[in-house]
Amino acid sequence: MTVNPAQRAAAQHPCAGEERQAPLIAPGVTSRNFTNQIAGTALRPDVPAFWFWLFTVAAAGACMFIIAVAILLITGVGTMGNNIPVAWAYPITNYVWWIEIAVGGSLLSSILYLLNQSWRNSINRIAEAVTLSGIACAGLFPLLHLGRPWIFYWLFPYPNTTSVQPQFRSPLVFDVFGIGTYATASVLFWYFGMIPDVAALRDRARTQSAYRFYGILALGWRGGSRQWRLHEKASLLFAGIITPLVFTVHTVVSFDFAISLLPGWHSTIFPPYFVDGAILAGLSMVVALGIPMRAAFNLSNVITERHLNNLAKLILTTSVILCYTYVIEPFTAWYSGDGFEMYTVHARATGPFAWTYWTFIVLGLGVPQLLWFKQNRTRTKRLFLIALAVITGMWVERYMLLTTSLSRDFVPSSWANFTHTAEDSALLYGSAGLFLTLFLLLVRVLPMVAIHEVRELLPSCKPGGGAAK
């Protein structure tokens, strides 16, 4: 009987005789070759063709975004399709969408760290890159929406002689402090966790410029026992700070809508509903970007079928919770006895923006149900397409929430539809280009896999013979 190399490697695995799940790390990976593989990916002078062409397209999108912003600043917000009563349209839709993508990345990098879920070790750096890139894009849209973005500093409580202070009862001011805190904590958590890996790149640098660059980022890391103890404490501290921020930041974003009196927005279910939708969109973005990076940089030995399966299960779980909120929404409107609420529910499904409602139902709620089948959770092409569908559906859903409530408020005489302009499209697609540009630079210049965390899993059996979980 012929035994292929994969079967031979599995038979030599220390835990081969035990019933266990799919391995977190492919058999045969050693500490030395794994470190050289990840460090070599960042230090190599050339790049995969896929990365190069994707970066070219992303950079073109980022240039389009810069041009669109310049036109907006010179001409004014009248270039966008915003009107009265739909004063919040594409800018706030994009803002909420990018924030929820960032929140999903934080779920993997912080909450699973506190829960000691070691399968996150191979994908947390990609998730953190998604978080940082998403925050950078999200923070721009509230400023661009101000009309006079050059005076954005009025939102901060700085001492001034004109006595113009921010309105602290406004949820828009909450957003400034929430995003600022969230961005600061995310950057620190990402950077502190990466210091040992940057030191590994410093020690393997082949040029003087690379040695100096990574040496500065490594902050003098030498890998002593005291440094490791302080590093673990700092990582645990930042994970503990970010974990409540994952929930509170998007809860604050939901307050932009929930504390208003508009039908369809004035609801106590918005905070958990927004948080769940954020996790769903963020996890989908991690999958949609992780699968191509896995293929382009030959990381299938580190990001295995088990990682994809676990991510798909999380997407499925959050989509089911979101289904519940949409099932209960008509009942809540009917039970409240509020005619305006009942009309809003009806208008979303049958009104001029009904296409957004049904598009979300299909892409955001229907397509994820395909993940009940294991072949869809472990086949990379299928999972990639499902993740893209969910990401698209979540943007359409935020757009639907904004336009349906704003365009159909209490007074029919003030009703008006919304039509997007070329400026709106350029800002949307351009921000996607900016996001991809930042993400691709982060995973290219810095380790895209947490080297020191994955190395902890390489002894395939823990003391006592149990397989690594």
Image: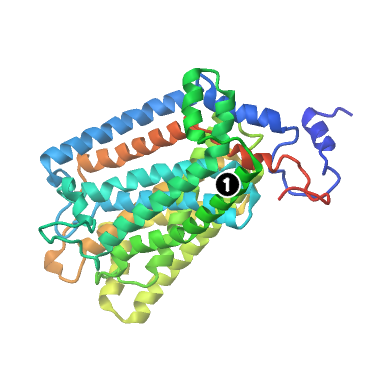
Q: Is residue 66 above or below residue 101?
A: above
Judge left or right: residue 201 versus residue 153. Answer: right
Residue drawn at (40%, 70%) of the image = 269
Dot 1 amino acid type = His
Q: Residue at x 16, y 59 (%)?
A: 416
Q: Quadrant of residue 334?
A: bottom left
Residue 435 image offset from top left, x and y in percent: 38, 39
In this rendering, would 16 be left or right of 372?
A: right
**Can residue 224 be seen in the rendering of this structure?**
yes
The image quadrant of residue 134 is top left
In the foreground, 155 or 422: 155
Observer-nearest of 46 and 221: 221
Q: Residue furthest right?
A: 1
Q: Is residue 246 toward the left or the right of residue 156 in the image?
A: right
Number of residue marks: 1
Crowding at mark 1 (Cα within 10 Å: few <14, some 14-19, many 20+): some
Q: Quadrant of the N terminus?
A: top right
Residue 249 pos. (x, y %): 39, 59
- Residue 14 lies in what quarter of the image? top right
- Residue 159 lies, with reference to residue 336, above or below; the image says above
Up the image or down, 297 lies above or below 156; here it is above
Instruction: Say which residue label 1 marks.
Output: 231
Mark 1 falls on what kind of element? helix
Q: Is residue 384 visible?
A: no
| Residue 440 image point, x, y percent | 44, 32
In this orientation, which residue lies closer to the viewer: 406 or 218?
218
What is the x, y in percent for residue 186? 44, 49
